[in-house]
Amino acid sequence: MIKGAIVIDTERCKGCAVCTGACPKQVISISKNVNGKGYNYAEAVKEDECIGCASCALVCPDGVISVYKVKL
């Protein structure tokens, strides 16, 4: 079984939400909080559901998402 984990650079995220639509497990959502630039950034809300597919990282226009996979 593969467990995924994502790390989002919230200070560089512009909150475009492209990643939220790309995630098959709805792991990511846009935060109500804002970063230093005033953007509502993406954040992982269902981290345990991540399968490490990297769809979010592939579609991110700013490359702020890193995906890690762990074999259990």
Image: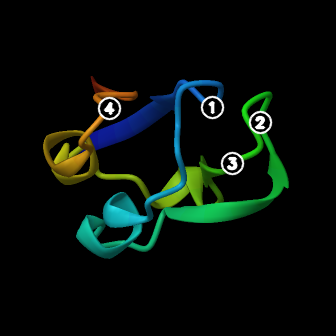
Q: Mark 1 or mark 2, which is nearer to you?
A: 2
The residue tagged 1 is 10
Image mark for residue 39 = 3
The kind of residue tagged 2 is Asn
SS class of the residue under badge 2?
A: loop
Dots 1, 2 in contact, CB < 8 A: yes
Dots 3, 2 in contact, CB < 8 A: yes
Which residue is found at the position 44% from the left and 59% from the top? 16
Q: How many marks?
A: 4
The residue tagged 4 is 72
Q: CA distance from mark 3 to mark 2?
A: 6 Å
Image mark for residue 35 = 2
Residue 24 position within the rendered picture, expressed as x and y whole percent measured from the top left: 26, 73
On the rendered structure, is 4 left or right of 49? left
Give the mark nearer the N terminus: 4 vs 2: 2
Q: CA distance from mark 1 to mark 2?
A: 7 Å
